[in-house]
Image: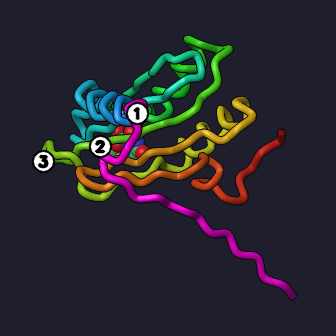
């Protein structure tokens, strides 16, 4: 019998260590948390996607009284990005969140399983890695790809 192991490399950076481009994406994700509609959870998530055409597309979680009908920030952003710019490739996604106290989370949040699968689709379409930035109030976690968030992913491609 043999054993396989999968490891995930995460860089931990502070805001002022980021490139100007990445800082702009972090700002956009943080700003998008203010457009979250979360009257049930009071947990405000924002996502910002950088595209290879230079555009930044943002999304925020949108809840619904019929709870499962709501959508996470990441899927709001990635579905809108591809609907609006179907030819563009994703390059980076940044995700920010504010907790029920209204303050930015200390520990970065990571996308739920469904969002990981949805984001992976666009990484495959991009034919290259999509960088992931998970934003906390001090530490920003940087992963080199969506795939590193979803090892052994299902894919027909
Ligand atoms: N949520 C997101 O928008 N993204 C995540 O990565 C995790 C959770 C939303 C769903 C729901 O509106 C609220 O956060 C609480 O779970």
Residue visible at 35% across and 29% down in the picture: 24
Task: Write down the residue under mark 1.
Answer: 47
> Where are the magenta residues, as a range?
1-22
- Residue 66 seen in this snapshot: no
Whether residue 19 is in magenta: the answer is: yes
Calculate the distance from the C-alpha at mark 1 to the C-alpha at mark 3.
Answer: 19 Å
SS at badge 2: strand
Q: Nearer the viewer, residue 27 or 36?
A: 27
Q: Residue furthest right?
A: 1
Residue 34's x, y, as percent? 23, 28
Up the image or down, 138 lies above or below 75; here it is: below
Quadrant in which the N terminus is drawn: bottom right
| Horizontal side of residue 100 vs 88, given as left or right | left
* Residue 23 visible in the displayed image: yes
Q: Which residue is mark 2?
A: 97
Residue extending furthest bottom?
1
Q: Earlier in the sequence, mark 1 or mark 3?
A: 1
Ligand 1 has an atom within 8 Å of the beta carbon of the residue at disc 1:
yes
- Please name whichever residue, 30 or 98, is drawn nearer the observer in this view of the structure: 30
Q: Position of residue 84 (x, y in %)?
A: 55, 11
Tell me whether the residue at label 1 lies in contact with that at label 3, contact meaning CB atoms closer than 8 angstroms: no
At mark 1, the secondary structure is strand
């Amino acid at each position: 019998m043999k054993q396989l192991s999968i490891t995930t490399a995460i860089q931990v950076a502070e805001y002022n260590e980021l490139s100007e481009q990445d800082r702009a994406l972090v700002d956009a994700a943080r700003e998008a948390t203010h457009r979250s509609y979360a009257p049930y959870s009071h947990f405000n998530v924002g996502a910002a996607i950088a595209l290879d055409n230079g555009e930044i597309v943002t999304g925020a979680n949108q809840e619904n009284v019929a709870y499962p009908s709501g959508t996470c920030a990441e899927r709001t952003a990635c579905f809108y990005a591809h609907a609006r710019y179907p030819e563009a490739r994703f390059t980076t996604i940044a995700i920010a969140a504010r907790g029920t106290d209204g303050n930015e989370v200390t520990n970065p949040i990571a996308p739920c399983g469904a969002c990981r699968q949805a984001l992976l689709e666009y990484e495959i379409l991009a034919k290259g890695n999509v960088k992931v930035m998970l934003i906390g109030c001090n530490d920003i976690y940087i992963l080199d790809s969506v795939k590193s968030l979803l090892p052994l992913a299902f894919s027909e491609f």
